[in-house]
Image (cartoon, rainbow, N blue to C red):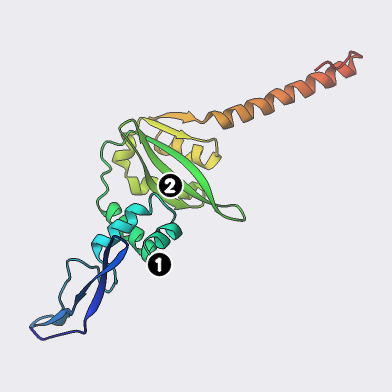
Amino acid sequence: GYDRLAKRRFEFVPLWGIKVFLVYAPRRVECPSCGIRVEQLPWARGKRPLTRAYGWFLASWARRLSWKETAEVFRTSWESVFRSVEMAVEWGRAHQDLSGVQAIGIDEIAWKKGHKYLTLVYQIDAHCKRLLWIGKERKTKTLLRFFRWFGAERSQQLRYICSDMWKPYLKVIAKKVGQAVHVLDRFHIMAHFSKALNEVRAGEVKELKAKGYEPVL
């Protein structure tokens, strides 16, 4: 042993609305090879003032409420809720099991004004539905990054892919997972169908007028 640092407070899960803290003075040890080091605290992460238990508690509630509401209900800061969710996501990514994925869905979501998009890839197997990956923008290189992350071997095991008719997605899917059944969402199919039908209708009207008939269409 070397000495102790000043006492620190670590916030724990509140009981009946009462805030609870663990108070502890971390010890420092003198290692012959590493020098002076602070002991690792099993209930905390680095210098963060929240205990691991409280972090997981906030992260679980942040799935049901907004981050702001979670902070207000449990009388903590938005930053604490954000750090808790960040901890849960980091743990989930480190322990993610990607075996047995046979069906994925690819879509985009607008996250900022000015046509700023994120590409989302989901697992949509019957036994497991979850978000797998997020990439900035919705370009060809964006989806290529997903397949590089996912791996060639796992990609060849995919049986079904669902996406819209965004051309960069179609191009990458045909190149990387041509063996899978590609399901296109009905909204875009019907949009193209309606557009084509309207073009045919307009052409028929024009032809009827040219021949002197009433344009009934």
Q: Residue 137: horizontal and vertical position, in percent?
A: 51, 52
In this picture, residue 80 sits left or right of residue 32: right
- Is label 1 in a helix, a strand or a loop? helix
Residue type, label 1: Glu
Q: Residue 88: horizontal and vertical position, in percent?
A: 31, 56
16, above or below 188, in the image? below
Q: Quadrant of the N terminus?
A: bottom left
In the rendered picture of this protein, how many numbered marks are placed on residues? 2
The disc at residue 186 is none
Q: Residues within 10 Å of mark 2 (few under 14, many from 20)?
A: some
- Is label 2 in a helix, a strand or a loop? helix
129, above or below 90, in the image? above
Q: Residue 129: horizontal and vertical position, in percent?
A: 35, 37
What residue is disc 2 on? Answer: 144
Q: Residues within 10 Å of mark 1 (few under 14, many from 20)?
A: few
What residue is disc 1 on? Answer: 79
